[in-house]
């Protein structure tokens, strides 16, 4: 059975612990990249990562886009919403359906 993990700053991801999600605290893009690479080798099916860190490691995120697992989902941090997660979902839906049906 696959696990679910979340990566981000402490204030943004600690609440996920109450839901039974594996929480990983990153301090910068480099540590976020190391955590993503580590989790991809384990039985993690979904990795949620805050947009702040995702924008620092786009090549790592793209590396796993074509893989079945882990699915990497961008979420806003508690500081601000950069809109990257929604844009990513729109792009994925457009790719799957052939048209943007969300707008």
Image: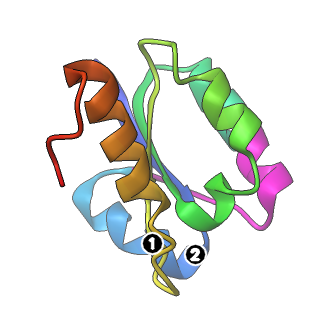
100 horizontally vs 2: left or right: left
Task: Give the magenta range.
Answer: 22-34
**Residue corresponding to mark 1:** 14
8 horizontally vs 23: left or right: right
Q: Quadrant of residue 88?
A: top left
Q: Residue furthest front?
A: 99
User: Looking at the figure, which quarter contains the N terminus?
Assistant: top left
Q: Residue 65 in magenta?
A: no
Q: Residues within 10 Å of mark 1 (few under 14, many from 20)?
A: some
Task: Name the foreground residue: 46 vs 101.
Answer: 101
Q: Residue at x 44, y 69 (%)?
A: 76
Q: Residue at x 35, y 32 (%)?
A: 92
Q: Residue at x 20, y 22 (%)?
A: 97
Q: Quadrant of residue 39?
A: top right
Q: Position of residue 51 (x, y in %)?
A: 55, 62
Label 1, label 2: how many angstroms apart (C-alpha)? 6 Å
Colouring used for the render? rainbow
Q: Residue 29 in magenta?
A: yes
Residue 38 seen from this side: no
Task: Name the foreground residue: 92 vs 18.
Answer: 92
Q: Position of residue 32 (x, y in %)?
A: 72, 51
Task: Name the foreground residue: 89 vs 27.
Answer: 89
Q: Position of residue 69 (x, y in %)?
A: 44, 18
- Above-or-below relation of 59 to 1: below
Secondary element under disc 1, as helix, strand or loop, is helix
Q: Residue at x 33, y 44 (%)?
A: 89
Q: CB of mark 1 within 8 Å of CB of mark 2?
A: yes
**Residue corresponding to mark 2:** 10
Q: Residues within 10 Å of mark 2 (few under 14, many from 20)?
A: some
Q: Quadrant of residue 71?
A: top left
- Above-or-below relation of 103 to 33: below
Secondary element under disc 2, as helix, strand or loop, is helix
């Amino acid at each position: 059975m696959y696990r679910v993990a979340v990566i981000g700053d402490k204030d943004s991801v600690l609440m996920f612990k109450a839901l039974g999600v594996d929480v990983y605290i990153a301090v910068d893009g480099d540590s976020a990249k190391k955590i993503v690479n580590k989790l991809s080798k384990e039985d993690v099916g979904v990795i949620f990562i805050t947009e702040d860190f995702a924008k620092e490691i786009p090549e790592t995120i793209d590396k796993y886009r074509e893989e079945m697992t882990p699915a990497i989902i961008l979420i806003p941090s508690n500081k601000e919403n950069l809109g990257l997660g929604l844009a990513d979902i729109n792009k994925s839906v457009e790719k799957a359906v052939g048209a943007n049906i969300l707008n």
